[in-house]
Each structure stands twice: as structure tokens, then as C-alpha cells.
Amino acid sequence: MKKETKDIKVLLSRHFPERGIEMMREEGYGLTVWNEDRPMTQKELIRKARSHTALLCTSFEKIDKTFLDHCSHLDIISQFGVGYDNIDVDQATRQGIPVGNTPDVLSDATADVAFGLMINVSRKMFYLHKSISQGEWNYFRPNANLGIELKNRTLGIFGLGRIGLAMAKRCRGAYNMEVIYHNRSENSEAEREIGARYVSFDDLVENSDVLSVHASLSKETSGRFDKNVFGRMKSSSIFINTARGLIHNEEDLIHALDNGIIWGAGLDVTNPEPMAPSNPLLSMENVAVLPHVGSGTVETRNKMSELAALNIIELYRGNEIPNLVNPEVLKTG
């Protein structure tokens, strides 16, 4: 899409890492950056987007039919993130709006968080750290605060894509864990590289010592991990979710942990987000919770900023959008 530079105006819904901002300034675009220490409401986002030609947003903005009906003039929506369940992609496609994202660059950072949560849960590290600040480190008790070891256990991956494979490689290398997985389709790369084995969803749930969720949020995965699923997991198992909080039912997870149905849980995503400070998960000894920081490294966030900006830049240069979520939109143009 060729357009006069003076006519290109990009709305940035947050203050993103400077590299992407610099790239667009170098192109001569007019930029509006939301610098307040709070998210925009949807009404604010719509009002501002109306006077811009492109939007660079996060997965926390609601880009639904209401937004798109008011902002059907947009040339592109570029998301700072790999997931895009916050965007009504079908509606954007019908209105001829390309949607871009930032895949691949988050894999290692997010897998590190999943791996770290697993270790922290297995040894109750978050809980024990808090116990020190509460004055509870007093004397040695041989049977108190015992964790569980991970060596030679079975890792189950729900959604063995790039992030899931990075997690599996860490677990295989560090703890010699057997890797089983369930996907919509088999992952021959993972089977070849680490001997991962495809199993049914039921087998995944029943045989995993650690069950790590890396699937995208969809109608099929929303609420997939509920009381029925937790009830079929091993009582010694650990549940990890670094994908989307809506994939698990949080009330059912709390019940499963409270009643010893599963052993522990590590979450980088919650349902809802942000989590309330009074949430009982935060006081459980076998639970570790982080505030959705899977991609939170300097290197990863800089690269995400670059890719999100590049989606916009290449569109206006008349080139192919590098990371286009809805290629079918090209047929509507």
C-alpha cells in the first residue's frame, strides 16, 4: 500500500520499547503515543484511532466488532504480541484490515518462565521466600516444606508449537523428562529432536507429572482445564499455564489444589487478569503466580517492538507484511 508519508499516522496504545518507535519516526510517520500510566478505555481508543491510519496495540486492547465498525478506515492493526484472541480477526478481514503480530521472538523468554515456574512450584520457592519475610524461618524441621523432584518425570505439553517445544527441550535436557504432547496435528520436528510422543488428550491428562499449557485461546481451548480434567490428573502432578488464563477454570483449579486433587500449579496467566490480591492462589504453598510477564526480557520486548513496527512499515512501503495473521484479507482488497 503506497501512501504519502505525511498522511501516515500511527496510534500506539502503550509506550512501547523505543526501537520500534524510532523505526517509524525514521520513516517520517506521525506518531501518537499513549503515555498515561493506565490503559485506554475502548471509547478512548476508538476516539483516537479515528484520526489515525494505523494502530499498534497489545493483547489487552479489545479490538472487537464495535471497535472495528467505528475504525473501519484503518490500514493495518499490528499487535505487540504473538496471541491475537483480543482481535475479531474475521471482522477485520471482512473490512479489509490486515492484522499483524510478532511471532517466534517470544519462544525462549516464555519457555524460561514456564520452566522457572515448574521448578519454583516443585520446591515451593515462592511460598518459602514469603515465609522468611513473615518471620517464619526459625528452626530445622526434617519433614516440613518438602518439595518433589523432577528428574525422569513425564512432561505433558498441551499445544506443542514453538514455545512448547522450547519448554520441552529444557525439561528434556535438564531433567531427562519423557515428553508427551497433544496437538491438533502431530509435530514431527519435536518427535525427531527430543523423542516427543503424540498422545490423546485423555492420555496427556492422566499420564503427565507436569502438564504445561502452550496452546492458543480458541473456542476449543477456552475453559478446557476444568474440574473434570483436574480430577483425572495425577494427585502428584503440577499444572503450568503460560498461554492464556481463560484456558483454565480458576475456581476449579483452586478447588483441585485445596483438596489435593493435584499437587501444585504455576501460572503466568490468570482468569481474570489482573488477579485480585486476595486470590487464595497467592497464599498456597504449592503455587507460584507471575503477572503475565512471559515475554518480559529487554531483548524480547525490543524485538517485539521492531517486528510490530516492521509490519506497519512494510505495508506502507508497498511490500508484503512480514507477520500477517489474516492473509485472506489480501483477497478482499
Image (cartoon, rainbow, N blue to C red):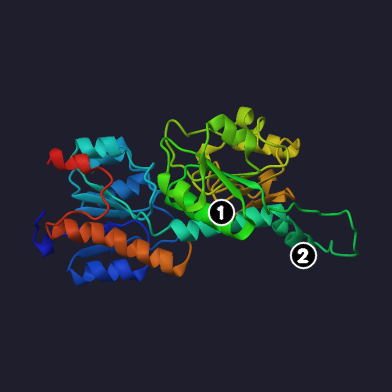
Which class describes the residues within 10 Å of circle 2: few (<14), some (14-19), or many (20+)? Answer: few
User: On the rendered structure, is 56 left or right of 317?
Assistant: right
Q: Circle 1 sits in a helix, a strand or a loop, which is it?
A: helix
Q: Closer to the observer: label 2 or label 1?
A: 1
Residue drawn at x 19%, y 65% as measured from the top left: 29
Going by the numbered disc 1, the residue's amino acid type is Ala
The answer to whether residue 327 shows anywhere in this view is yes
User: On the rendered structure, is 238 left or right of 191?
Assistant: right
Residue drawn at x 39%, y 60% as measured from the top left: 105
Nearest the eye: 130 or 330: 330
User: On the rendered structure, is 287 left or right of 326?
Assistant: right
Q: Position of residue 95 (x, y in %)?
A: 19, 38
- Residue 213 circle label: none
Which class describes the residues within 10 Å of circle 1: few (<14), some (14-19), or many (20+)? Answer: many
Going by the numbered disc 2, the residue's amino acid type is Ser
Q: Is residue 209 shown above or below 11?
A: above
- Residue 133 circle label: 2
Q: Is residue 302 shown above or below 56?
A: below
The answer to whether residue 294 shows anywhere in this view is no
Residue designated by label 1: 114
Q: Position of residue 271 (x, y in %)?
A: 55, 41
Residue drawn at x 22%, y 57% as measured from the top left: 312
Q: Position of residue 328 (x, y in %)?
A: 20, 39
